[in-house]
Image: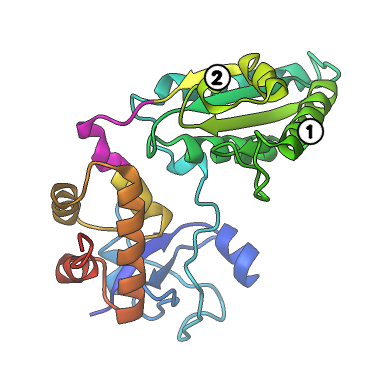
Amino acid sequence: MLSIEKLYLGADLFNSELNINSAEPVAFNQSGTVMSNCESEISELVSGELKTVTFPDGVSGKQLPLPLTVREPFDLDYFVPHSGVAACLDEIKLALFSAINAISEENAVNPPPAIFLYVYGPRGCGKTHLAKGVCLAARGLGVFPTEPICVDDGIFSDGVILDSEDGARRFISVTESIRRQGGVCIVTSKQDAESSFRNPHVLSRLKSSAQFALTMPREEELKPVLISIFERRNLRVSQKTLEFLLQRLPADPLSFVDVVGRIDEFTLASGRSARGSAVREAIANYDE
């Protein structure tokens, strides 16, 4: 019996990765192999109006190696807007939509808006995903002349610490550039600005930013978070497996990320599906 982990609908993946021009659905098994000549097995997994699967020209009868890596792990499409971040996310989306309207032909402004955000909260609340997702979204809008800046946990992407002298100089330069030209800058930390930073130039700029305090998801919100983490790895698991993991793991989304990574690596290496015994074996030594 073929093990099919996920169906990809549409041509985007093929056009960008394989240069195959097709808008038909294609199935991959867990090792990232295009499964061909298996229409009946695939049709059982397809819901709605789709009952059969047609493969692109040149694919039927072949297996093409295709690594299933996460292309954009921090995309906001995978972000679960739990109660601890919902208000923040709504305000950020409003700011981005306002930027689009401000730059539209009917309401053109020059320069575009400058958006400065400071997001803080405990480990695992979602601030890193939110911050990097906002930068990806801002970049995708194509309306800002400057590159979106994300200083996650007070550290620039190249490792420079924001509260250091070099970091402060860079931050001053970045913020002034965004003020003149428009753009997005988001800084995250575990605590409020005054508790996290000492450099007066950094602190003054952060305190003038829009500030958001995030909290952890409630217990009943953990399942959607876990599902999202599996989806980011192109894995589909049963409700039974989800319930097993939620009972076994700490109520900490970062623990979920670690465990799902282990499951992904184990199932890829063993050629097994992310179900039952394979999941239990993958996390057998997790508490040790």
Rendered image quadrant of residue 222: top left
Amino acid, disc 1? Arg
Q: Main secondary structure of the magenta part?
A: helix
Query: Where does the image place residue 12, in percent across and percent down from the top left?
Result: 58, 58
Residue 90 visible, this angle: no
Q: Residue at x 18, y 47 (%)?
A: 246
Q: Quadrant of residue 194?
A: top right
Answer whether residue 261 is visible to the viewer in this image: yes
Residue matched to label 1:
169
The 10 Å Cα crowd at callout 2, few under 14, some 14 to 19, many 20 or more, is few
The x, y position of residue 115, in whole percent, is: 68, 22
Q: Could you tell me which residue is drawn at 67 percent across and 40 percent down?
A: 140
The residue range painted magenta reads: 215-225
Residue located 79% across and 15% down the image: 106
Q: Quadrant of the C terminus?
A: bottom left
Contact flag, marks 2 and 1 (Cβ < 8 Å): no
Q: Residue at x 82, y 17 (%)?
A: 108
Q: Quadrant of the N terminus?
A: bottom left
Percent coordinates x, y for residue 270 in the rendering: 30, 80
Which residue occupies the foreground of this view, 220 or 35? 220
Image height check: is 266 above or below 95? below
Q: Would you name the residue on which mark 2 appears?
A: 194
Q: Is residue 44 left or right of residue 269?
A: left
Q: What mark, if any, has residue 93 been given in the picture? A: none
